[in-house]
Amino acid sequence: MTKNPYILNWIDEMAAMTQPDNIVWIDGSEEQAETLRAEAVSTGEMIQLNQDLLPGCYLHRTAVNDVARVEGRTFICTSKKEDAGTINNWMAPAECYEKLSKLFRGSMKGRTMYVIPYSMGQVGSDFAKYGIELTDSIYVVLNMLIMTRVGTAVLEAMGNTDGFIKGLHSKAQVDEENRYICHFPEDNAIWSVNSGYGGNVLLGKKCFALRIASYLGKKEGWMAEHMLILGIESPDGDVRYISAAFPSACGKTNLAMLIPPEIYKKKGYKVWCVGDDIAWLRVGKDGRLWAVNPENGFFGVAPGTNEKSNPNALYTTTKNTIFTNVVHNLDNNTVWWEGLDNNPPANAIDWKGNPWDYKKYDKKDKSTCGAHPNSRFTAMATNCPCISSEFDNPAGVPISAIVFGGRRAKTAPLVYQSFGWQHGTFVGSIMASETTAAAAGAVGVVRRDPMAMRPFVGYDMGDYWAHWLDMGKKIPNAPKIFHVNWFRTDDEGHFIWPGFGDNMRVLMWILARCEDKVEARETAIGYVPYAKDINIEGLDLGMETLEELLSVDKASWLEDVANIKDFYDQVGDRVPAELKEELKALENRLA
Ligand code: GTP
Ligand code: SPV
Ligand code: MN
């Protein structure tokens, strides 16, 4: 399919090591995809679902030991350890290549190696970057066909250059003890072995579009961020764009596809989804910050998705979707997950492939779940009823506001605005959130997760913050920076704020602030809304509760400051002086 010598030589080298029985190039055609689906069904790798109810939909189960990203086994392999920083795991490139070569040697014997040429971003656009993923998994091929732009057009756009990201993936034996997700930013390479879970193996996503891309962005003067992008259209047809960074499983897909509450809907407001997970941002000629979503689909969390919380996502998954680790409803050959509805199937198979009795399901005990808490759907962006008309615009969309947010039971108020770009960068750097099932390990533990990028920055965290500060100086018309928290809880542990579609009420305050249309209260942490300025019409939520959601508790913030100091120490010498000054200033304002 190509004469590009860099591509051909590299594939020869990788094939010599992994020793596949044959090599198949993925051309992006529907015929080839259909052949692969049939093959995956014949081997049991995928189950074809009810084609009347869910046309083009399939179910896949990963190995039980392989259900989430593995941050402990994810490495940034720069020649100097300092360049990977203290937050990332590091291995010397030579050592890592040698170690992984042993695991890759012969790993594709008896298997086919698929060559996937793909583009992150519109093929041929200024934003686009190209990659090739070599994999021995049909599941990976079929997911990449949804999540990225794949095929011959990408090879043509690459021409005869070596400007592509070289990704190598083998399921090997799916051996947990030898699972590695390794990035070589200096070589434009990614090696992933012994996993079959999305975030570890769809190399265009977190590995390329965040870890490698953040490194490239630092070098080239742009940003790769863990952000959704949405547009709010006002009744006069004007659309304003917001990008928001929340950690994994903290509400990006839900916010990106929100349905306006009745009070806004009836006035003619609409919300459009540009992206739900990743944004690439550049300074435009007009001095504003412009964003594209480099992906082509959604790899979304299934549990909790329902007709009320996210009808757009639910509709998106009704055709041509791959479901991973959800419940198989044997009565009608469809799927189910916790939080879909109140009718769990009586005749069902759980995510592990065992018969599942919903009567034994105990909300408090995750081990009784039918669907894994990190079970997912992979669906085309174009399936989404609220996909933005600008989704495919190669220039992207201009960003009015950047929103950071975490999952915090206490401390962080519903929303506040930073004092400016530098303080906004500080607000991003001190983000904290409870851990979720999206990564292996304990769930519900508060940890610092700067800009929701802790697991995804491909270089030193301090340098990454410096890059944020630098970028601020290059954007004459910079977005305003905010922080939100949908997850404050009461004494019984219930979420106080209704969330989901009602989050638009907060976004409206944010946009009003961007347009200087509303006053705010200056506090130690930033500008906080006056309760009267958040529209709660139609909500079962009193002014007092709203005041409570907007309160800034100095004692708990001072506790946070102590924790932030420790975290900054952990990040080390490269924490920018400006951020240390911001921390000092916050402490002084709180005192
Ligand atoms: P990744 O794909 O892992 O990056 O996750 P994400 O940030 O896109 O999170 P997603 O929107 O899939 O939401 C994750 C979980 O949080 C789901 O179970 C949602 O139901 C829940 N959630 C999302 N938004 C809200 C909200 O506003 N309030 C509450 N209480 N829960 C929410
Ligand atoms: C996340 O964990 O942030 C995800 C899912 O979006 S994964 O692709 O697995 O990283
Ligand atoms: Mn994500």
Image: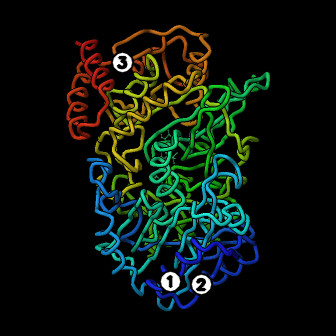
Q: CA distance from mark 2 to mark 1?
A: 8 Å
Please tell me which residue lies in front, 281 or 439.
281
Please tell me which residue lies in front, 69 or 11.
11
- The image shows residue 187, relative to residue 174, as above or below, that is above
Count the marks. 3
Q: Quadrant of residue 487?
A: top left
The residue that disc 3 covers is 525
What residue is at 48 percent from the left and 38 percent from the top? Answer: 245
The residue that disc 2 covers is 23
The residue that disc 1 covers is 15
Q: CB atoms at circles 2 and 1 under 8 Å apart?
A: yes
What residue is at 43 percent from the left and 83 percent from the top? Answer: 17
The answer to whether residue 232 of the structure is visible from this angle is: yes
What residue is at 60 percent from the left and 31 percent from the top? Answer: 289
Q: CA distance from mark 2 to mark 3?
A: 57 Å
- The image shows residue 236, relative to residue 485, as above or below, that is above
Foreground disc of the pair 3, 1: 1
Three-letter residue code for mark 2: Ile
Foreground disc of the pair 2, 3: 2
Three-letter residue code for mark 1: Ala
Q: Quadrant of residue 500?
A: top right
Numbered disc 1: secondary structure: helix
Crowd around label 1: few <14 · some 14–19 · many ≥20 (10 Å): many
Numbered disc 3: secondary structure: loop
Q: Position of residue 378 (x, y in %)?
A: 59, 60
What residue is at 68 percent from the left and 34 percent from the top? Answer: 271
Please tell me which residue lies in front, 546 or 11.
11
Q: Position of residue 480 (x, y in %)?
A: 53, 22
Q: Position of residue 43 (x, y in %)?
A: 57, 86
Q: Position of residue 409 (x, y in %)?
A: 34, 34
